[in-house]
Amino acid sequence: MSPEARARFTPPPGGAPRSVLVTACTACGACCAAPDIHALSKPLGVPCVHLGPDAGQGCLCAIYTARPSVCRSYQPDWVCGEVAPLPTLEARVARFLAIYGLEGDEG
């Protein structure tokens, strides 16, 4: 793993260590549900309308090949290692928002 990639998976000071095994997208859906995505008029904490249900293969994007650049440029980081193991999309979104201090702000 490159030093740049390793840095993305290093939690901030005071953060618990994360698994070095979670370094790629796990299709957990959190990045498609937790943040607001202006290019898709998607509010904070609301799953994207293009995000399919988890059918045992992860939450997959229905417009993946035509997704906006903000989605295309997203790279997994230490937050993925924190939220991906959680059992439901709702739990992953709640943890994602809590990490950034945004719980209660979702739309």
Image (cartoon, rainbow, N blue to C red):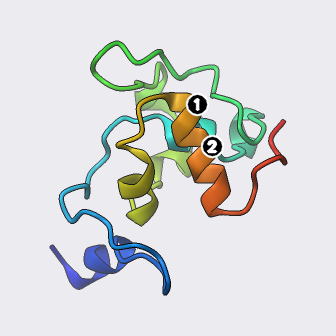
Crowd class of label 1 (few under 14; some 14 to 19; many from 20; radius 10 Å):
some
Residue type beneath disc 1: Glu
Q: Position of residue 9 (x, y in %)?
A: 34, 71
Q: Where's residue 70, x and y in %?
A: 57, 50
* Percent coordinates x, y for residue 47 in the rendering: 64, 28
Residue depicted at x 45% and y 25%: 61
Determine whether the residue tagged by mark 2 lies in a helix, strand or loop.
helix
The Cα atoms of the two marked residues, 1 and 2, are separated by 6 Å
Specify few, some or many for label 2: CA neighbours under 10 Å numbering under 14, 14-19, or 20 or more.
many
Looking at the rendering, which quadrant does residue 18 occupy?
A: bottom left
Residue 40, quarter of the rendered image: top right
Please name the residue shown 47% across and 28% down the image: 88
In-image side of 107 versus 51 (left or right): right
Pick whichever, 13 or 50, lies toward us: 13
Quarter in which the C terminus is drawn: top right
Q: Nearer the viewer, residue 32 or 102?
A: 102
Q: From where the camera sits, is residue 97 visible?
A: yes
The residue under the point 63% across, 27% down is: 48
Residue under label 2, please give it.
94
For residue 10, the mark is none
Write down the residue under mark 1: 90
Q: Are marks 1 and 2 in contact (CB under 8 Å)?
A: yes
| Visible residue check, residue 75 | no
User: What amino acid is labelled 2 in the image?
Assistant: Ala
Q: Residue at x 75, y 50 (%)?
A: 103
